[in-house]
Image: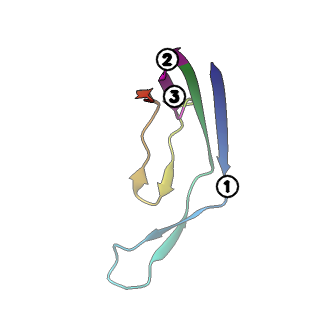
Amino acid sequence: FSLEGQLRLMRDIMGADFSGPSPVPVLYPLDDYAVMDVTALTRVWHGMELKLALRNALDAEYQAMYGYPMPGRNLSLAVRYNL
């Protein structure tokens, strides 16, 4: 069994808006944010592993690119079998 966590802190980011008539984008400051991901991995049988990942565990509302909000908290399960 293994447990892994990752915390990303983003500050002072600028986002570009290309929707105007000018080919030069308008830059806007984006809000600072923190995103935490947690992953658990375990072997359940000979060669079979289960991976459970919780993304954006803190359910942060943020934009990594201007005008594109990122998804909230989400959970995924993966099964891998090695022959």
Precedes in sequence: disc 1 or disc 3: 1
Q: Residue at x 49, y 17 (%)?
A: 46
Q: Residue at x 40, y 54 (%)?
A: 68
Q: Please state the horizontal and vertical placement of residue 54, each as a whole percent of the image.
A: 51, 28
Name the residue carrying label 1: 11
Secondary structure that dominates the magenta span: strand
Q: Please state the horizontal and vertical placement of residue 10, each as a whole percent of the image.
A: 65, 52
Residue type for callout 3: Leu
Name the residue carrying label 3: 54
Q: Secondary structure at mark 2?
A: loop
- Is disc 1 in contact with disc 3, using a CB cutoff of under 8 Å? no
In the image, is 62 to the left or to the right of 79?
right
Q: Is residue 45 above or below residue 75?
A: above
Q: Report if residue 54 lies within the magenta region.
A: yes
Q: Secondary structure at mark 3?
A: strand
Q: Nearer the viewer, residue 74 or 14?
A: 74
- Is disc 3 in contact with disc 2, using a CB cutoff of under 8 Å? no
Precedes in sequence: disc 3 or disc 2: 2
Which corner quadrant holds the C terminus? top left
Precedes in sequence: disc 1 or disc 2: 1
In the image, is 2 to the left or to the right of 25?
right
Q: Nearer the viewer, residue 29 or 2?
A: 2
Distance CA(mark 1)–CA(mark 3)? 23 Å
Name the residue carrying label 2: 46
**Numbered label attached to residue 74:** none
Q: Which region of the structure is painted magenta? A: 43-56
